[in-house]
Image: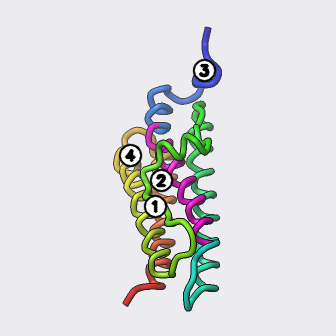
Amino acid sequence: MTDARTTVPQGSVDPDVAAGVAQFFGTIVTDLTALGVNGKQAHWHVRGIAFVAVHELIDVVVDHAREWADLAAERVVALGLPVDARIETVAARTTIPSTSPGFTQIDRTVAELVAQIDATLVGVRTAIDELGELDAASQDVAIEISRGLEKDRWFLAAHVAG
Protein backbone atom coordinates (compact mmCIF):
# COMPACT_ATOMS: atom_id res chain seq x y z
CA MET A 1 0.00 0.00 0.00
CA THR A 2 1.31 3.48 -0.84
CA ASP A 3 1.10 6.63 1.26
CA ALA A 4 -0.74 9.38 -0.66
CA ARG A 5 0.96 12.02 1.49
CA THR A 6 4.43 11.21 0.21
CA THR A 7 4.02 9.43 -3.12
CA VAL A 8 4.74 11.16 -6.41
CA PRO A 9 1.86 10.47 -8.84
CA GLN A 10 2.64 8.17 -11.75
CA GLY A 11 3.46 9.96 -14.97
CA SER A 12 4.86 13.00 -13.23
CA VAL A 13 8.46 13.94 -12.58
CA ASP A 14 11.19 11.59 -11.53
CA PRO A 15 10.79 10.86 -7.80
CA ASP A 16 14.48 11.58 -7.23
CA VAL A 17 14.08 15.03 -8.79
CA ALA A 18 11.02 15.75 -6.66
CA ALA A 19 12.81 14.60 -3.51
CA GLY A 20 15.87 16.72 -4.32
CA VAL A 21 13.79 19.82 -4.93
CA ALA A 22 11.81 19.19 -1.75
CA GLN A 23 15.02 18.90 0.25
CA PHE A 24 16.21 22.35 -0.79
CA PHE A 25 12.84 24.06 -0.90
CA GLY A 26 11.77 22.70 2.47
CA THR A 27 14.50 24.77 4.09
CA ILE A 28 13.61 27.79 1.99
CA VAL A 29 9.92 27.55 2.90
CA THR A 30 10.77 27.16 6.58
CA ASP A 31 13.11 30.15 6.63
CA LEU A 32 10.83 32.40 4.59
CA THR A 33 7.90 31.52 6.85
CA ALA A 34 10.01 32.39 9.90
CA LEU A 35 11.11 35.62 8.22
CA GLY A 36 7.47 36.55 7.67
CA VAL A 37 6.54 35.90 11.30
CA ASN A 38 9.63 37.64 12.67
CA GLY A 39 9.11 40.52 10.28
CA LYS A 40 5.64 41.13 11.67
CA GLN A 41 7.09 41.14 15.19
CA ALA A 42 9.63 43.75 14.06
CA HIS A 43 6.94 45.73 12.18
CA TRP A 44 4.84 46.12 15.33
CA HIS A 45 7.73 47.11 17.59
CA VAL A 46 10.15 49.23 15.55
CA ARG A 47 10.85 52.69 16.95
CA GLY A 48 12.88 55.65 15.72
CA ILE A 49 13.13 58.78 13.64
CA ALA A 50 12.23 57.07 10.34
CA PHE A 51 9.47 54.98 11.90
CA VAL A 52 6.87 55.28 9.15
CA ALA A 53 9.25 54.43 6.31
CA VAL A 54 10.78 51.42 8.08
CA HIS A 55 7.43 50.25 9.50
CA GLU A 56 5.91 50.24 6.01
CA LEU A 57 9.00 48.69 4.38
CA ILE A 58 8.96 45.82 6.85
CA ASP A 59 5.40 45.04 5.75
CA VAL A 60 6.65 44.82 2.15
CA VAL A 61 9.43 42.45 3.24
CA VAL A 62 6.87 40.32 5.12
CA ASP A 63 4.55 40.20 2.10
CA HIS A 64 7.44 39.17 -0.14
CA ALA A 65 8.59 36.46 2.29
CA ARG A 66 5.08 35.02 2.35
CA GLU A 67 4.77 35.16 -1.45
CA TRP A 68 8.12 33.45 -1.98
CA ALA A 69 7.38 30.79 0.65
CA ASP A 70 4.18 30.08 -1.26
CA LEU A 71 6.05 29.97 -4.58
CA ALA A 72 8.62 27.48 -3.25
CA ALA A 73 6.00 25.35 -1.49
CA GLU A 74 3.79 25.22 -4.56
CA ARG A 75 6.75 24.08 -6.67
CA VAL A 76 7.29 21.12 -4.34
CA VAL A 77 3.60 20.27 -4.27
CA ALA A 78 3.43 20.55 -8.08
CA LEU A 79 6.16 17.90 -8.18
CA GLY A 80 3.96 15.65 -6.06
CA LEU A 81 5.40 15.96 -2.56
CA PRO A 82 4.05 17.64 0.58
CA VAL A 83 5.58 20.58 2.44
CA ASP A 84 5.55 20.97 6.21
CA ALA A 85 5.36 24.63 7.25
CA ARG A 86 3.36 24.19 10.41
CA ILE A 87 4.44 26.66 13.06
CA GLU A 88 6.00 23.96 15.27
CA THR A 89 8.01 22.68 12.31
CA VAL A 90 9.14 26.17 11.35
CA ALA A 91 10.17 26.92 14.95
CA ALA A 92 12.14 23.68 15.19
CA ARG A 93 13.86 23.82 11.79
CA THR A 94 14.48 27.43 10.83
CA THR A 95 18.09 28.48 10.33
CA ILE A 96 17.47 32.19 10.79
CA PRO A 97 18.29 34.10 13.98
CA SER A 98 15.46 35.32 16.15
CA THR A 99 13.96 38.79 16.42
CA SER A 100 14.24 40.70 19.68
CA PRO A 101 11.08 40.82 21.77
CA GLY A 102 9.48 44.17 22.53
CA PHE A 103 10.29 47.59 21.19
CA THR A 104 13.55 48.07 19.29
CA GLN A 105 15.22 50.99 17.59
CA ILE A 106 15.44 51.10 13.82
CA ASP A 107 19.15 50.29 13.60
CA ARG A 108 18.75 47.12 15.68
CA THR A 109 15.53 46.11 13.92
CA VAL A 110 17.09 46.52 10.48
CA ALA A 111 20.27 44.68 11.53
CA GLU A 112 18.20 41.74 12.79
CA LEU A 113 16.08 41.57 9.63
CA VAL A 114 19.14 41.85 7.39
CA ALA A 115 20.76 38.98 9.35
CA GLN A 116 17.59 36.92 8.86
CA ILE A 117 17.57 37.64 5.13
CA ASP A 118 21.27 36.71 4.94
CA ALA A 119 20.59 33.42 6.71
CA THR A 120 17.69 32.70 4.35
CA LEU A 121 19.89 33.48 1.36
CA VAL A 122 22.33 30.76 2.40
CA GLY A 123 19.70 28.10 1.71
CA VAL A 124 18.47 29.86 -1.41
CA ARG A 125 21.97 30.11 -2.87
CA THR A 126 22.65 26.48 -2.06
CA ALA A 127 19.48 25.59 -3.94
CA ILE A 128 20.60 27.67 -6.91
CA ASP A 129 23.98 25.93 -6.97
CA GLU A 130 22.59 22.42 -6.59
CA LEU A 131 19.38 22.55 -8.63
CA GLY A 132 20.97 23.51 -11.95
CA GLU A 133 21.67 19.91 -12.93
CA LEU A 134 18.66 18.47 -11.10
CA ASP A 135 15.77 20.69 -12.21
CA ALA A 136 16.20 23.95 -14.12
CA ALA A 137 12.62 25.11 -13.47
CA SER A 138 13.14 24.80 -9.70
CA GLN A 139 16.48 26.54 -9.99
CA ASP A 140 14.66 29.40 -11.71
CA VAL A 141 12.30 29.67 -8.74
CA ALA A 142 15.28 29.85 -6.37
CA ILE A 143 16.90 32.53 -8.54
CA GLU A 144 13.70 34.60 -8.47
CA ILE A 145 13.57 34.35 -4.67
CA SER A 146 17.25 35.29 -4.40
CA ARG A 147 16.82 38.40 -6.55
CA GLY A 148 13.90 39.56 -4.46
CA LEU A 149 15.55 38.90 -1.10
CA GLU A 150 18.69 40.73 -2.20
CA LYS A 151 16.61 43.74 -3.21
CA ASP A 152 14.69 43.74 0.09
CA ARG A 153 17.99 43.46 1.95
CA TRP A 154 19.34 46.47 0.09
CA PHE A 155 16.24 48.56 0.83
CA LEU A 156 16.40 47.72 4.54
CA ALA A 157 20.14 48.25 4.89
CA ALA A 158 19.90 51.65 3.19
CA HIS A 159 17.98 52.94 6.21
CA VAL A 160 20.99 52.55 8.49
CA ALA A 161 23.92 52.82 6.05
CA GLY A 162 26.41 55.52 6.82
Q: Are marks 2 and 1 in contact (CB under 8 Å)?
A: yes
Which part of the image, by quadrant, shows the C terminus? bottom left
Instruction: Measure the C-alpha gap from mark 3 to mark 2.
Output: 26 Å
Amino acid at circle 1: Ser
Percent x, y of residue 118: 40, 63
Q: Judge whether residue 159 is colored magenta.
A: no
Amino acid at circle 2: Ala
Amino acid at circle 3: Gln
Amino acid at circle 4: Gly
The quarter holding residue 160 reads: bottom left
Q: How many residues crowd around disc 4 within 10 Å: few (fewer than 14), some, or many (20 or more)?
A: few
Give the mark, 3 or 2, whose residue is nearer the N terminus: 3
Percent x, y of residue 155: 50, 79
Instruction: Measure the C-alpha gap from mark 2 to mark 1.
Output: 6 Å
Instruction: Measure the C-alpha gap from mark 1 to mark 4.
Output: 14 Å
The residues colored magenta run 23-43
Instruction: Measure the C-alpha gap from mark 3 to mark 1.
Output: 32 Å
Viewer-nearest of discs 1 and 4: 1
Percent x, y of residue 95: 42, 51
- The one of 78 and 60 positioned closer to us in this rendering: 60
Above or below: residue 161 compared with residue 145: below
Q: Which residue is mark 1?
A: 146
Give the mark, 1 or 4, whose residue is nearer the N terminus: 4
Q: How many residues crowd around disc 1 within 10 Å: few (fewer than 14), some, or many (20 or more)?
A: many
**What label sits on residue 10 in the rendered view?**
3
The quarter holding residue 4 reads: top right
- Secondary structure at numbered mark 3: loop
Instruction: Measure the C-alpha gap from mark 4 to mark 2.
Output: 10 Å
Q: Are marks 1 and 4 in contact (CB under 8 Å)?
A: no
Which part of the image, by quadrant, shows the N terminus? top right
Viewer-nearest of discs 4 and 2: 2
